[in-house]
Amino acid sequence: MTERTLIIIKPDAVQRQLMGKILTRFEEKGLKVVAAKFMQISQELARKHYAVHEGKPFFDGVVNYMSSAPVMVMVLEAEGVIAMSRKLMGETFGNEATPGTIRGDFGACRGYNLVHGSDSPENAEYEMGLYFKPEEIVDYTLASEAWLYGSND
Ligand code: IDP
Ligand code: MG
């Protein structure tokens, strides 16, 4: 079944002018972009986004990081997109992430890690609702879908 996920190209990636390269990783994989927005996240919205981490030692830090400068927010769609995009992103911190992943190729620290991706269908629904109205998520077909998502059964 088709699935959607919320991806954020985080402030460090925008400042380092890596938006295009990161978006290319998702596009080259064959994941379909169905919504996109360039914006600066408020502290209040960042707190809602990371509400599951409230009370943890890094909560204030991640809220400040995410609201410190502009981001690019996207919704991607494909069967299994949540797991696929998490694999493309790599482990949480660049200094540990496997080379070949976005975090593994572009990050070298624990403070900033370039990209966010939802980790479950429930969190994806919650996060998409924070950033997009339903009508801002566009339903369309890619011309290449038969080849991208085809089966030889
Ligand atoms: P994830 O982004 O790989 O899903 P989570 O554990 O859900 O990682 O943490 C959410 C975000 O909070 C991370 O992407 C990172 O920006 C930040 N974060 C998590 N743990 C730490 C930490 O120990 N120090 C600093 N920042 C952290
Ligand atoms: Mg997470």
Image: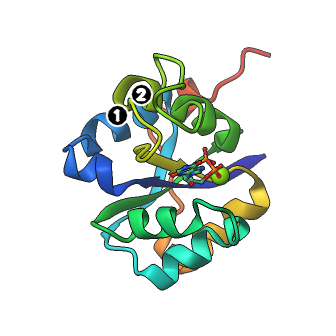
Residue under label 2, please give it. Answer: 28
Q: Is residue 87 left or right of residue 45?
A: right
Q: Is residue 45 left or right of residue 5?
A: left
- Of 133 and 140, nearer the camera is 133
Q: Residue at x 75, y 52 (%)?
A: 120
Q: Residues within 10 Å of mark 2 (few under 14, many from 20)?
A: few
Q: Residue at x 73, y 14 (%)?
A: 152
- Of 40 and 74, nearer the camera is 40
- Check residue 24 in the rendering and tell me which mark sits there, or answer none: 1
**Residue 26 location (% of width, % of height):** 45, 36
**Residue 9 location (% of width, % of height):** 39, 51
**Residue 101 location (% of width, % of height):** 48, 24
Q: Amino acid at mark 1?
A: Thr
Residue 52 in the image: above or below residue 100: below
**Residue 143 location (% of width, % of height):** 44, 38
Q: Amino acid at mark 2?
A: Glu
Residue 59 in the image: above or below residue 25: below
What colour scheme has been applied to the protein in the rendered image? Answer: rainbow
- Of 72 and 49, nearer the camera is 49
Q: Is mark 1 within 8 Å of ligand 1?
A: no
SS label for mark 1: helix
Q: Residue at x 43, y 47 (%)?
A: 111
Can the viewer see residue 132 in this picture? no
